[in-house]
Image (cartoon, rainbow, N blue to C red):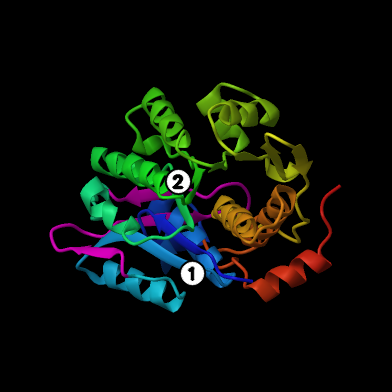
Amino acid sequence: MKPTHFILTGEAMALFIACEEGPLEQVRRWESGIAGAELNVAIGLARLGHSVSYMTAVGDDSFGRQIIRFLEENQIDTSLVQIDPTRSTGFMLKGKVSRGDPPIQYFRRNSAASAINAQQAAACLEDVDGGFLHMTGIFPALSAQTMEASVFLMRRAREIGMTVSFDPNLRPQLWPGQEAMRQALNQLAGYADIILPGIKEGEILCGETTAEKIAACYLERGAQAVVVKTGAKGAYGASKNESFQEPTFRAEKIVDTVGAGDGFAAGTISALAEGLSLRESVRRGNAIGTLQIMSPGDNTGLPTREQLIHFMQTTPQEE
């Protein structure tokens, strides 16, 4: 396999995971980690052997230094990480639950990453020759500057021949309203070659209730491929030449659903970069998404290539 170079942009945050169930304000013991949707994808790609650069900004503080060290430990290029001495690194709390999604609270307002502008982001694409740019809808939600930077990056990447993938990854609490979120994310989707919405996200963004119609919505806007995540049913993939429903893999036990979509994205776009078919790519995405929901951390379930191959060879897909 010839490694593909991926560039990802987003906000990495310090993470505190509750060691006991209950409301966040009652938790007494926490485990620390690192979080961020784009960061999770970056880790997934790096563990599969690809070359990965991650652009973000952190404060000149202990959280920022922890993030940089974490990136280095995961073989992710940190040359695009900026240190802002005037702002702090964001962090978040995540609760522990026996079922369903855990409660989450963010502390990221006016963070270092929220101040990244288009001029700073331009450094991402200097001397770039091909490869992938992966973006989500979280970074543009942080501020007017990061929205402007996102538009610049995605448009410029297309101009210089990169493949652009986009996961809407809705965070309504970061937007002033649902209509503003819908308009902004659909604008960004218009610059993407590959779009990876969830079925509920597609309902909000496209006003459609089926994976087929959500995929058609974005294919008509110019996407080359659309993969709609359909939860326990797996994912629906579509291009101008084909469409299919690909079942997910069987999970022994669901521990934590956070990060599943990021694992799915890492699996899908890494396989596409390696020349696999859209269906084979979605199958890999389903496999890594399943591995991730069997792990308690945001990115601890992301596999090496050897672990991925073993899982896909030994684990049945759902009927």
Q: What's the residue at 53%, 28% (across, down)? A: 221
Question: Disc 1 marks which residue?
Answer: 51
Question: Disc 2 marks which residue?
Answer: 136
Which of the 4 image quadrants contains residue 251?
bottom right
Asked if the residue at tag 1 contacts the one at tag 2, i.e. Cβ–Cβ closer than 8 Å, the answer is no
- Residue 22, relative to residue 218: is it above or below? below
Residue farthest along the right direction in this orientation = 319
Residue farthest along the bottom direction in this orientation = 73
Q: Position of residue 48 (x, y in %)?
A: 59, 70
Q: Position of residue 135 (x, y in %)?
A: 44, 48
- Residue 112, relative to residue 30: is it above or below? above
Does residue 19 appear to the left or right of 241 in the view shown?
A: left
Q: Is residue 22 visible?
A: yes
**Closer-to-camera residue (129/94):** 129
Badge 2 marks a residue whose secondary structure is: strand
> Which quadrant holds the N terminus?
bottom right
Report the amino acid beneath label 2. Thr
Badge 1 marks a residue whose secondary structure is: strand
Report the amino acid beneath label 1. Ser
Magenta stretch in the rendered image: 79-108
Does residue 222 appear to the left or right of 26 in the view shown?
A: right
**Closer-to-camera residue (284/102):** 284
Q: What's the residue at 66%, 25% (across, down)? A: 213
Q: What's the residue at 39%, 62% (across, down)? A: 54
Q: Say which of marks 2 and 1 sits in front.
A: 1
